[in-house]
Image: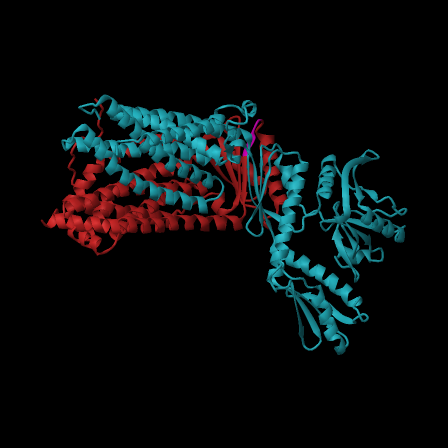
Amino acid sequence: MPMKFVPDNTNIPFVSFRFIAFGLTLLLTLGSLALLATRGLNLGVDFRGGLTIESEFKTAPKLDELRSQMDELGVGQSALTEFGSPRNILIRLPLPEPQGDDAAVQKVVAKVSSELKDNYPGVTIRRVESVSGKVSGELIQKGITAVLLSMLAVAVFTWFRFEWYFGISTVVALIHDIIVTLGFFALTQLEFDLNVIAAILTIVGYSLNDKVVIDDRIRENMRKFRKMDMGSLIDQSVNETLPRTVMTTVTILIALLVLLFLGPDVIFGFTAAMVLGIFVGTYSSVFVSSSLLLTMGVTPDKAAADAIRGEGTAEERAKARKAAERGRV
Amino acid sequence: MLDFPRWKIWMTLATLLVGTLFAVPNFFPAETVANWPAFVPRQQMNLGLDLRGGSHILLEADASDVRKSRLETLEEIARTELRQADDGAIPFLDMSMRDGAISFTVRNPTDVDRAVEAMRAISRPVGQLSATRDVDVSVVDGNRVVLRPTDAGIAAETDAAMKQAVEVIRRRIDELGTREPTIIRQGDTRIVVQVPGLQNPEALKSLLGKTAKLEFRLVDVDADPAQVAQGRAPPGSQVLPMVEGGAIAVKRRVLISGDQLVDSQPTFQDGMPVVSFRFDSVGGKRFAKATQENTGKPFAIVLDGKVISAPRINEPILGGSGIISGNFTTESANELAILLRSGKLPVALKVIEERTIGPDLGADSIRAGTLAAIVATIAVATLMIVTYGRFGVYACIALVLNVILILGVMSGIGATLTLPGIAGLVLTIGAAVDANVLINERIREEQRKGRNVFNSVDTGFREATRTIWDANSLNIIVAIIMFIFGTGPIKGFAVVLSIGIATSVFTNVTVVRLMVSNWLVRTRPTALHI
């Protein structure tokens, strides 16, 4: 007999937790914003401009020694981080001025590489990346545009496909998801690079999945149970979809955790962001976005009236009208 | 939902078969695949630079550079035209370059109309149909003529220069003998160069960063050495740095430029590395004339504004070929020869972004990524089977088919697999089964409501399909935005994600429904263990 992670017919009163949930959400959001304001993000070369050299040592070097060796080269303030293992070190340096002078960059790379080879026999340079301030500025702009545009697209789609209030509750929850993820990066000081933007967009995508599934059920139940109290209707919908929410979260988490522990080090930050995002997204779907509908004063009756008046597609209007007639009999 | 017409079954199977055929080459080494007959798909997925190792370099041209060199040529042409005007030379004063324009004063007010006429004649139309010309001619203060290149003219000039720059870069990289370089124009003033599997990226970058503008000019022997040391040169001359250090005064007039070179090779003279060059017939004649007229004088060989050497012309060089000596090493002589052979860049290019990944790192990433994909598939499959029994097995078959189809589509359209792309694949493995979870949970619900087997499966698929479409449409929108605004590796991630969303709806909904309906029709079960 197949097993079940969530028992049949759960009846968890999610809606009654909403004030705690809203409070927690507000706290998390404000906390993240505060972290972003005080600690800031540890921007990678993609967004800050500069030079990154990833090197693999035969044995783990002492970071203090390595740092002072780098500083003696006179190539600017260096930042060293372990990358995946103590033998892999990421060396970050500012780009020589004026930017765009490739010969100067080459000189810095050559200096660093010969210094490393002198002091640590057997060291290999695995990766060199240099991004000028001009390009990094554009990358920031493109990243922000991508995130904002995807939010807008989501809002418009949910508005067309559902009703406007689903659009609002979804986008509010998504903004929370994004801010908390950014806060996580401010807290852990994991490198924030281009890949993390992709991770954030993916979080938006999967968080949306959860919200659409629940919204879909709420809409279905709103049509079925027109006289039901909105709070219980939301509770019922969230409970009905709970086995699916848990199961999908688990399968995605399995894939991500495998990637986090077995996958390449280069995408550690990217995967970590997504693992966190899955938790945050699921939380905001179950506790926040659905309960927001109640706070906004949506009721099954009002929804039916809205649907008939003409928001949504013609097909939905016809369906809603029929449902309304059936409900009245 | 559960009845499948025969044609639909065949279509589904045919799609799976074609997808699999396209995926197959990826599981064999490239050498083996090359020997396969032509009627089977042989194309393998492209691997991104982050997986195979190599260099990605973004070059940018300075648009103001194009304007400046356009002004310089314009000044030269204007001088010539004024001297050679139809009804006798037009005397002018004070020709200068200021604020992006060339201007000069016509000495006799009566000549102004003729001067304007002559200047209009040098402007050319931009494009074939438009009335815009590349230079705007106007008169200020009665007798001062202003030549201003128009924006359209500069844009056309930049465009031509960039096209030529791409060609020059291609020639230079080909000289290095690297495999499959990608050289693409990006936007108005940028060029992306991607060279996979390069052992020595420094040589490449050193080649890309140089304009290679070669000029032969006379050394100004009359210049006062003390003045030269302070950077001052007599009129008509300028002080240029020497490659080996120090500075020298050379005449501004270029005797002959490197544009007319047809060949250049590294060679040895008295055991020292030198670079030989050969002019085409026109260049050869000019070189012969110039050396004849200036025998006994020193001339400077200037590369990108630096004097390589300034030898004395001992005798006229009539054969059109010669040798550049200087403080060369074998490598630098070879590099200069390549630069001269492939021609000068029409515009200076700067490296504004560079990513070089060692081949080891790429190989490690592929290994780790493949391992993660396999382990994730096994883990997710186990969980699905444990949770949903027979329906879990169907989901697993769909999962494997989905991975195969993603690989097939990627190979078929020639998409590039990047490291984030592998992550996207692993993520899709976890996310694709969401469709099955939705369907199966819905079937469970319908069962609990007391519906019979057929009815609950049918309702389960129908109700869940709507949700699946809504959720996946949204995800596709986000993936497309990611593709449009993403760069490099992120684009690769977005590609895998979009393909994965599309194929997963097919495998995890359509194919699973086919398997379920086949099982239901065949065995007509009375109870469902789900």
Circle count: 0
Name the main secondary structure of what is drawn in magenta. Answer: strand
- The answer to whether residue A125 is visible is yes
Horizontally, is B146 left or right of A37 in the view?
Answer: right
Vertical order, B396 against A133 (above or below): above
- From the viewer's side, name the closer residue of B187 and B366: B187
Chain depicted in red: A
- From the viewer's side, name the closer residue of A131 and B104: B104
Residue at x 34%, y 25% (from the top left corner)? B397
- From the viewer's side, name the closer residue of B249 and A326: A326
Residue B152 part of the magenta segment: no
Residue B483: where, in percent of width, then height? 44, 44
Horizontally, is B475 left or right of B208 in the view?
Answer: left
Residue B187: where, in percent of width, then height? 55, 50
Residue A124 part of the magenta segment: yes
- From the viewer's side, name the closer residue of A77 and B144: B144
Instruction: Tell me the quarter of the picture where residue B92 sits.
Output: bottom right
Q: Furthest-front residue in view?
A: B6
Vertical order, B12 against B340 (above or below): above
- The answer to whether residue B376 is visible is no
Horizontally, is A7 left or right of A28 in the view?
Answer: left
Residue A293: where, in percent of width, then height? 21, 49
Chain depicted in cyan: B
Residue at x 25%, y 22% (from the top left corner)? B522
Numbered range of the magenta stretch: A122-126
Instruction: Tell me the quarter of the picture where residue A187 sits.
Output: top left
Residue A99: where, in percent of width, then height? 58, 49
Query: Which image quadrant: the N terminus of chain A?
Result: top left
